[in-house]
Amino acid sequence: MQILLAHGPNLNLLGERRPEVYGTTTLLEIEAEVAAVANARGAAVICFQTNHEGALIDALHQYRRVVDGVVLNAGAWTHTSVALRDAIEAVQLPVVEVHLSNTHQREDFRHRSLIAGVCIGQVTGLGRDGYGVATALLLDHLETRG
C-alpha cells in the first residue's frame, strides 16, 4: 500500500512561519513522522509540497494510479480552490484533509473548506499529531474497503 502526503502553499516554511499558530515542527519532521506511522502498518509514503496550485493538481493526477490514498494539507487553497476540489473528486482517491491549526477558531474565511465535501475526513487543530491521526484514518479506510 502506498499513500501520498501532499502539502500546499507556505508549508515548506513550517517551523519558521508563525510558530504560535503552526508550531515549530518542520515539514521534514512531519514527513518522517507520517512515514513512521505508515511504515509501521506496511505502507509507504510519497511526499510532495508545492506553492503552485496547478502543480498540486498535476501531482494528484500523476499519482492517481500510483497511490491508494492521500493525506492532504492544502493550506490556503482549502478555502479558495474549486479547481483543487474538482481534482480531488476527479482522481477518485480517498483523501483525508489535515490542518495543524484549528481553522474554525481562526479568521472567518478559514471556517469553510471547499474540499471537505470530497474528502473522507478532516483532521484539524491537533498540531503535528493530526498528521498521524489523518494517516491512521486513511489507512483504516483503505484496509476496510479492501
Image (cartoon, grey):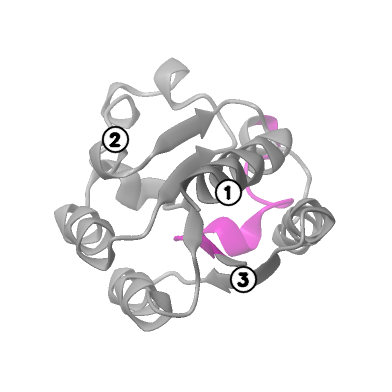
Asked whether 120 or 101 is in front, the reply is: 120
Tell me residue 11's x, y (percent).
Answer: 56, 57
Mark 2 or mark 1: name the one nearer the start of the chain. 2
Q: Amino acid at mark 2?
A: Ser
Number of the label disc, if any, that sits on residue 47:
3
Asked whether 98 or 38 is in front, the reply is: 38
Is 104 above or below relative to 68? above
Q: How many marks?
A: 3
How far apart are the two marked residues, 3 and 1, measured between alpha carbons? 21 Å
- From the viewer's perspective, tell me whether residue 84 is left or right of residue 141: left
Mark 3 or mark 2: name the one nearer the start of the chain. 3
Instruction: Identify the residue at the far top of this view.
Output: 105
What secondary structure is found at the residue carrying circle 2?
Answer: loop
Asked whether 31 or 18 is in front, the reply is: 31
Q: Amino acid at mark 1?
A: Glu
Number of the label disc, if any, that sits on residue 113:
2
Residue 41 lies in the magenta-colored region: no
Number of the label disc, if any, that sits on residue 143:
1
Mark 3 or mark 1: name the one nearer the start of the chain. 3
Tell me residue 131's x, y (percent).
Answer: 65, 43
